[in-house]
Amino acid sequence: MSGHATVAVSLFATAMLATVAIGVLSARGRARSLSEWSITERGLGTLFVLVLMAGESYTSFSFLGAAGWSYRYGIPIFYLIAYLSTGLAVAYLVAPALWTYCARHHLVSIADIAEHRFRSRPLGIAVALICTIFLVPYVQLQIQGMGVVVNAMSYGAINLKTAAVISFIVAETFILTSGLRGSAWVSVLKDSLAVLSIAILAIYIPWHYFHGPSELLNRLVAEKPNWLTFPGAGGGTFGASWFVSTILLNAITICVFPTTVAGYLSAKSPNALRRNSILLPWYQVLLLIPILIGAAALFAAPALKNPDLALFTLVTDSLPSPIVALIGTAGALSAIVPMSVFLIAIGTLCGRTILGGGLHGNATDSRQRRASQLIGLLVGLLALGGAVLYPKLLVNLSVLSYEGIAQLVPAVLLGLYWRRLTAIGVGAGLLTGGAIVLLLHATGYDPLFGVNGGLFALAANLAVAAAISRQSEPADNLPLTARQAVNKA
């Protein structure tokens, strides 16, 4: 192992030990209930909600994928900033309503919302299964993302498989003991390192390679104009229609994403969520820096075989090993934090709704918590096995994730505002939308006419759900809608 690698690996190991200690100690003196494990007993203030939800949006994809997309495609990568910020504008209205509804009825997941609103355990189970199917690829993506980050940061001294195992052990250690609260506390460390890393990159890389950002931008305009206009350098796939439709679909979907809802429900009050929706868009501005670094790599490393290595190729080439370790640790924690939240969400969905009997089952709270923790462990092992043995198997499903979870909008969100919607209508719409998503991907027609195929699927889903609901009778004794719950709170 070289001297540079020794320094980087030593600092990385210290940071991982600190991460485990922070995550485990955060549970001291806390109740051992499912609500505490999954949503911190709704006990997080504005700052912790901010860093927790920032941790979900600023993942290993921010260090790898954002720079990689910038390197490979150019301007289409700005959809990432656009939909996250637009989604927070939607969340300003949606998040307080969801929080109030769930707090009033003691709900802890989106499967709980569907089951309670429609008085239908089968619908709750369907929501839990769909979420699990589409979240597992995200867990594997974070494991593999950490592998790439740590391998690059250690100058190749730590291989991809070893890094994957490290990420699994670190994340599972603190989520099994402290749950979402541990993720929130680790997010403080992660965000501190991420902001410091981004500041270093923003200042150092443009001046090291180009004597300033203006020269980089001038070269982009003169030598790479295709990267600055739609559809970018990727041909006709990511045009303006795809850009706008993807922002629209993702902005709606992110508000009902299982991990996002877990973040909502962890807050002390709706006001904490409103403040979060105001503050967090500023955090998305940081994503401009990896995008800029990806553009810089077009000239500093023009022959990269793997675009996802654009950022770390420049980092390891130009910065001293302690700074490389700092940036690598920030990237690794940007995989560990969202991975832990995904596993907690999956564990809660399956452990409570499927194994724990749902809202009205006979299982005790402690049994539901143990079942949820076991599911989190088993799913983590599944994702780890996929990352080590079959790195492309589950990841291929990730392209379907947002489009698949978008089909839950009627069950989780629309039903809280439209009292006439029924379980039969929602179920039929869910089947219709899901079938269209799978069909478009299987036949290669996504995007369709340049538009994100998930939007067509969601439109059909809503049409079927509305039509069938008008022909069927709603359940008796339905709970208050979200609007009614907010008005009475």
Image (spheres, rainbow, N blue to C red):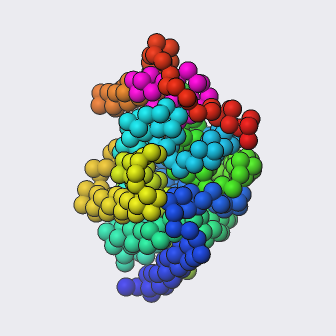
Q: Quadrant of residue 437?
A: top left
| Residue 398 location (% of width, % of height) | 39, 45
Q: Which residues are magenta?
A: 406-429
Q: Quadrant of residue 289?
A: bottom right
The residue nearer to you, when weighing 125 against 20, is 125
Residue 425 magenta-highlighted? yes
Which quadrant does the C terminus fall into? Answer: top right
Which quadrant does the N terminus fall into? Answer: bottom left
The residue nearer to you, when weighing 365 against 299, is 365
- The image shows residue 213, relative to residue 109, as above or below, that is below
The residue drawn where x is 38% and y is 30% is: 434
The secondary structure that most of the magenta stretch takes on is helix
Residue 173 in view (yes/no): yes
The residue drawn where x is 72% and y is 57% is: 46
| Residue 407 location (% of width, % of height) | 45, 32
The residue drawn where x is 53% and y is 50% is: 108
Residue 126 magenta-highlighted? no
Please state if 105 lies on the left or on the right of 437 as rendered: right
- The image shows residue 434, relative to residue 144, as above or below, that is above
Give the total number of marks visible in the rendering: 0
Tell which residue pokes out farthest to the top in this image. 471
The residue nearer to you, when weighing 209 against 199, is 199
Tell which residue pokes out farthest to the left in this image. 389
Residue 91 in view (yes/no): no
Please state if 107 lies on the left or on the right of 97 as rendered: left
The residue drawn where x is 35% and y is 51% is: 355
- The image shows residue 126, relative to residue 34, as above or below, that is above
Please state if 289 lies on the left or on the right of 62 as rendered: right
| Residue 291 location (% of width, % of height) | 57, 52
| Residue 450 location (% of width, % of height) | 47, 25
